[in-house]
Image: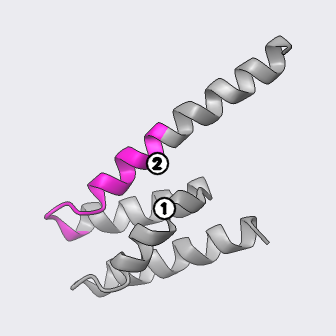
Amino acid sequence: MDIENTMDKMQRMGASKDVKRLINVLKDEEWDVREKVAEALGETGDATAVESLIEALKDENMGVQKDAKKALQRIQKRHI
């Protein structure tokens, strides 16, 4: 394996860990934190966030719901 492939793999692994951390924060008590996290998860385009974002569609706060929906749409576009 060459150095470029190794570096690429390491970056993807790091990004995956960040997504897992964001998913955990998606359950924060503060709605504004959950809203920003939903937005950030959409920006990652990482499909591992889909299940948690679907749950966020049921959030008590409409802003969180809206950003979760947008995030799911962004992830879907990246994986089509």
The crowd level at tag 2 (other Cα within 10 Å; few <14, some 14-19, many 20+) is: many
* Identity, as a three-letter code, of the amino acid under mark 2: Val
**Residue projecting furthest to the front:** 1
Residue 2 placement (x, y as % from top left) = 86, 13
Q: Main secondary structure of the magenta part?
A: helix
* Identity, as a three-letter code, of the amino acid under mark 1: Ala
Q: Which residues are magenta?
A: 17-31
**Distance between mark 2 and mark 1 Cα atoms:** 7 Å
Which residue occupies 59% across, 61% down? 47
Q: Nearer the viewer, residue 12 or 38?
A: 12
Residue 29 placement (x, y as % from top left) = 13, 64
Residue 45 placement (x, y as % from top left) = 62, 58
Q: Is residue 79 left or right of residue 41?
A: right
Q: Secondary structure at mark 1?
A: helix
Residue 39 placement (x, y as % from top left) = 46, 64
In terms of sequence position, does the residue under pointer 2 or pointer 1 come before the other? 2
Give the residue number, with chain letter if any, for mark 1. 49
Disc number for residue 19: 2
